[in-house]
Image: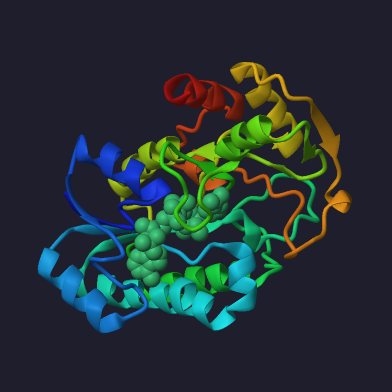
């Protein structure tokens, strides 16, 4: 298969390119090569490539920045997705678009399945959900994949790092580190997402998917595992979300159940702890 990868130098895009290259011909596209908010550009670039599929990892996902620039966020997350859906449908491409656990409000307090009602709480989340809907309605051969708390070997370009690099940095700079115990999710390495996306894209099971590691963990417990594994000596303390100003509303429980992947026997996601241990061993 020939696969165009948008956001190829991003955190997830880098791993998608590497993992997919083992089996398919890859066309890596950075923001310099394509602007998803511009339909003429999308038509031109994807039309010239003549691929079979496009995987989009591009998004406006600096969450506080989206709040102050809703139009800019909608242009990329909403209209960008609409453009990709229309052009993919015209060209007969399969389309993968990544979305987010933030489409939920967190009140369920039990793992969310794909059919659960959404209630996005922020500009970022609303625009990502709009993107999902555009893709479902304007293209047929689509995989909309919701991920959560992602981390990879290259920093997230929109946020300038990930949770692990932030913990390592804080442990070096601060006398103590405080992390929230009452925000629960399932952090997931981009390499595992790339691997599971590869098996999914080879199928014709077009649908919405949750794709996160197994299990659930608070950010504090996740940080504790990082500190213990890397033997960071700086004291680490539990905190509450109430101890920090709430810059943007977000779900404090956003565990996703990979129900649709399991239904088609394609769930390859490991437990969060095994994935974290492997990532730390490989990268630190
Ligand atoms: N980070 C998380 O924890 C998290 C959680 C849930 C879901 N997600 C989703 O996961 C996906 C991947 O995130 P990531 O961390 O890999 O992001 P990233 O590192 O910021 O990479 C995004 C890539 O897309 C490019 N891009 C941005 N706007 C573009 C546009 N308008 N047209 C074309 N390319 C554009 C960026 O290029 P430039 O930097 O040069 O603009 C960059 O190469 C996103 O859809 C995000 O919403 C992330």
Indicate the quadrant where residue 224 lies: top right
Q: Nearer the viewer, residue 206 or 227?
A: 227
- What residue is rendered at 34% in x and 77% in y? 83
Q: Position of residue 19 (x, y in %)?
A: 29, 37
Drawn side of residue 158 relative to residue 244, left or right: left
Here the colouring is rainbow
Q: Position of residue 70 (x, y in %)?
A: 58, 79
Q: Nearer the viewer, residue 7 or 186?
A: 7
Drawn side of residue 191 relative to residue 220, left or right: left
Q: Where 3 falls versus 141 (above or below)?
A: above
Drawn side of residue 223 relative to residue 165, left or right: right
- What residue is rendered at 49% in x and 58% in y? 158
- What residue is rendered at 44% in x and 70% in y? 136
Q: Where 164 falls versus 233 (above or below)?
A: below
Q: Number of numbered discs present?
A: 0
Q: Position of residue 39 (x, y in %)?
A: 29, 81
Q: Nearer the viewer, residue 163 or 195?
A: 163
Q: Is residue 18 visible?
A: yes
Indicate the quadrant where residue 119 lies: bottom right
Q: Nearer the viewer, residue 50 or 263?
A: 50
Q: Quadrant of ligand 1?
A: bottom left
Q: Position of residue 263 (x, y in %)?
A: 50, 42
Q: Where 160 falls versus 20 (above or below)?
A: below
Drawn side of residue 21 relative to residue 138, left or right: left
Q: Where 202 falls versus 98 (above or below)?
A: above
- What residue is rendered at 38% in x and 51% in y? 10
């Amino acid at each position: 298969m020939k696969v165009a990868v948008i956001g190829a130098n991003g955190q997830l895009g880098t791993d998608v390119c590497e993992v997919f290259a083992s089996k398919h011909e890859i066309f890596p596209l950075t923001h310099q090569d394509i602007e998803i908010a511009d339909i003429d550009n999308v038509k031109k670039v994807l039309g010239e490539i003549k691929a079979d599929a496009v995987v989009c990892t591009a998004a406006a996902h600096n969450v506080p920045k989206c709040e102050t620039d809703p139009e800019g966020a909608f242009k990329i997350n909403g209209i960008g997705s609409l453009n990709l859906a229309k052009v993919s449908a015209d060209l007969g491409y399969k389309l993968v678009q990544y979305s987010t656990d933030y489409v939920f409000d967190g009140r369920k307090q039990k793992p969310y399945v794909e059919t659960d009602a959404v209630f996005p709480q922020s500009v970022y989340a609303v625009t990502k959900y709009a993107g999902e809907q555009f893709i479902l309605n304007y293209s047929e051969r689509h995989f909309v994949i919701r991920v959560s708390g992602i981390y990879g070997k290259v920093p997230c370009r929109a946020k300038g790092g990930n949770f692990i690099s932030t913990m390592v940095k804080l442990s070096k700079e601060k006398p103590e580190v405080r992390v929230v115990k009452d925000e629960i999710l399932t952090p997931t390495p981009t390499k595992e997402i790339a691997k599971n996306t590869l098996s999914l894209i080879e199928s014709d099971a077009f649908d919405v998917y949750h794709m996160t590691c197994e299990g659930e963990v608070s950010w504090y417990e996740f940080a504790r595992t990082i500190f213990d594994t890397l033997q960071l000596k700086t004291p680490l303390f539990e905190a509450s979300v109430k101890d920090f100003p709430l810059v943007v509303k977000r779900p404090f429980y956003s565990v996703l159940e990979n129900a649709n992947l399991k239904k088609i026997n394609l769930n390859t996601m490991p437990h969060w702890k095994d994935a974290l241990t492997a990532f730390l061993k490989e990268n630190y």
